[in-house]
Amino acid sequence: MSQLEEILQYFPNLSETQREQLTKLEPLYRDWNSKINVISRKDIDNLYLHHVLHSLAIAKFTHFKPGTRILDMGTGGGFPGIPLAILFPEAKFELIDGTGKKIRVATEVAQATGLKNVTALHRRGEEEHGKFDFVVSRAVMPLPELMKLVRKNIAKRSGNAIGNGVIVLKGGDIKEEIKPFTKIVEVEEISQWFSDDWFKEKYVIYIPV
C-alpha cells in the first residue's frame, strides 16, 4: 500500500477534491524541494507519512467547525497547515514563518492545490497580532516559549467542541515541556490513530488558553 493510500484509509470520507489535492502534494513538494530545501532530502520519500499524515493527527484529535480561524506558527513549507486546510476547507488558515523562502513554497503549494482558505505570510511570531481560535505548530520551539509567544493571539470567544487554545505536534520525552501546564494539558498518543511504528512516542498536545 502506498503512503497516500494509507492516508485515504484513515480518512475514508474525503471528497474527490480533497483526494486530488492530497495527490498533488508529493509532486509539488518534490519539485520545490529540489530548488528550496524545506524537507530533508532523505525524508522527501516519506512525505505522506512523516509530514502529511503526521499533520493530520490534529484532525483525529479535533474537528474544526466552519469559520474557525487557525494560525500555523512556524509552518516551514506548510506543515501542519496545508494538510489541515485540505481537510477543513471551511476553516481559515494563516501560515507564518520567519524564513521567506519557506513561505514561498507554502504559498505556491497552496495555490497549486487550489486552496482558497490559506494565507501564507513571511512573519515572525512576535510580529503576529491577529486573533485566532487555535494556534497549531509542529515542533517549532519548546512549549513554554511558544505559549508565551502566542497567548496574545488566542481569541476569547470559542465556537468549537474544545475551547480555544494551542495544539502542537511533539515527539520524544515531553515531561519537562508540559510540566508548567500539567493541570490543564491534554496529551494524546498519535499511535492510537495511526499504526505505523514511526508514530510511537509522538503526541498531539492541547493546551486551552
Image (cartoon, grey):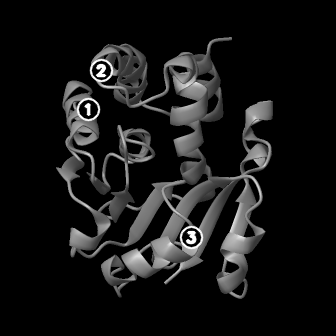
Instruction: Name the residue rendered at 36%, 79% in the picture.
Output: 154
Label 3 residue SS = helix
Residue 86 seen in this snapshot: yes
Q: Is residue 110 toward the left or the right of residue 157 in the image?
A: left
Amino acid tagged 3: Leu
Sort mark 1 into few (<14), some (14-19) or many (20+) by Cα contacts within 10 Å.
many
Res 170 → quadrant: bottom right
State the separation of the CA atoms marked 2 and 3: 30 Å
Instruction: Indicate the amino acid at tag 1.
Output: Val
Identify the residue at image location x=69%, y=55%.
Answer: 203
The picture places residue 8, in percent across and down from the top left corner, at 57, 26
Disc 2 on helix, strand or loop?
A: helix
Can you tell which mark lies on residue 32?
Answer: 2
Q: Amino acid at mark 2?
A: Trp
For residue 22, side relative to residue 126 (left or right):
right
Q: Quadrant of residue 82?
A: top left
Q: Is 36 above or below relative to 178?
A: above
Do the CB atoms of the residues marked 1 and 2 lie less than 8 Å apart?
Answer: yes
Tell me, for residue 105, which label it has, or none.
Answer: 1
Which mark is on residue 143?
Answer: 3
Q: Residue at x 19, y 42 (%)?
A: 116
Q: Position of residue 97 (x, y in %)?
A: 29, 52
Label of residue 151 in the image: none
Q: Position of residue 143 (x, y in %)?
A: 56, 70
Separation of disc 1 and disc 2 at Cα? 7 Å
